[in-house]
Image (tube, grey):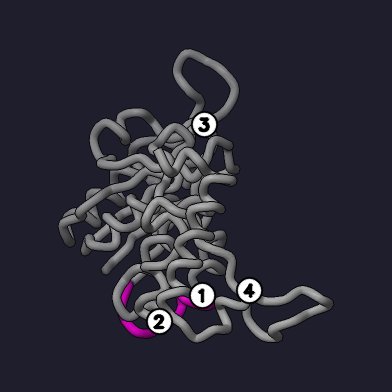
Amino acid sequence: MRIDILTILPALLEGPFSASIMQRAQDKQLVEIHIHNIRDYATNKHKNVDDYQYGGGAGMVMSIEPIAAVIEKLKAERTYDEIIYMTPDGELLEQTHANQLCLKENLMILCGHYKGVDERVRERYITKEISIGSYVLSGGELAAAVLVDSVVRLLPGVLNDETSALTDSFQDNLLSPPVYTRPPEFDGMKVPEVLLSGDFNKIEKYREEQAMARTLARRPDLLK
């Protein structure tokens, strides 16, 4: 898989992709993550990528020209399955989005800033708009990092335990059950006996019951 991220602040994306699972995925050549500075495509003297909005009002708007330039360059080199814009008014990111996107070959992600991008960018180029929550960030970079992480960890070979992702929260519309590790007792708090029993049928049933109970208590909307 190849992921191209368009941003005016590349430094914000260096950390999330240079450690842990994201770094290992790249080292294994399971994913290529390329970060493009939109300012490099600005043609004006000061490399400005924003301007005042028509009609007046507070806040600047990202200009269409440099964004279009980088998108057109990349599209000339390969075909993209999705061109995604990270925006508060997009579809709320769900596990199903990650499941679908991990099957793609080439993804492009545009990170917004200021009051957003010129609407014509969205009309001409964007195929999917995604939000990570009902709140506003300073820019789309952190949201893009969240999206990329949720997708890349599902690629075959990325996780050491291939079944791990399949038992994550939300994969079957249930939250994960509680988990425990050593020691079996801490300060009077004991690990449930069933998990120490070695009876995998009972353990599986216990986990299913706990997952259902936790989902019902914390996210009953998932059961609908």
Q: Which mark is residue 185?
A: none
**Between marks 3 and 2 in the image, the one whose residue lies nearer the viewer:** 2
Question: Is residue 95 or residue 136 the one in the foreground?
Answer: 95
Helix or strand or loop: what does disc 4 sit on?
Answer: loop
100 part of magenta stretch: no
**Between marks 4 and 3 in the image, the one whose residue lies nearer the viewer:** 4
Q: Are marks 4 and 2 in contact (CB under 8 Å)?
A: no
Q: Are marks 1 and 4 in contact (CB under 8 Å)?
A: no
Question: Is residue 41 or residue 81 the one in the foreground?
Answer: 81
Q: Which mark is residue 192?
A: 4
Mark 3 and mark 2: span between their CA atoms?
42 Å
Helix or strand or loop: what does disc 3 sit on?
Answer: loop
Mark 1 and mark 3: span between their CA atoms?
29 Å
Mark 4 and mark 3: span between their CA atoms?
51 Å
Residue corresponding to mark 1 = 18
**Chain-order first, disc 1 or disc 2:** 1
Residue corresponding to mark 3 = 115
Over which residues does the magenta segment extend?
Answer: 20-31
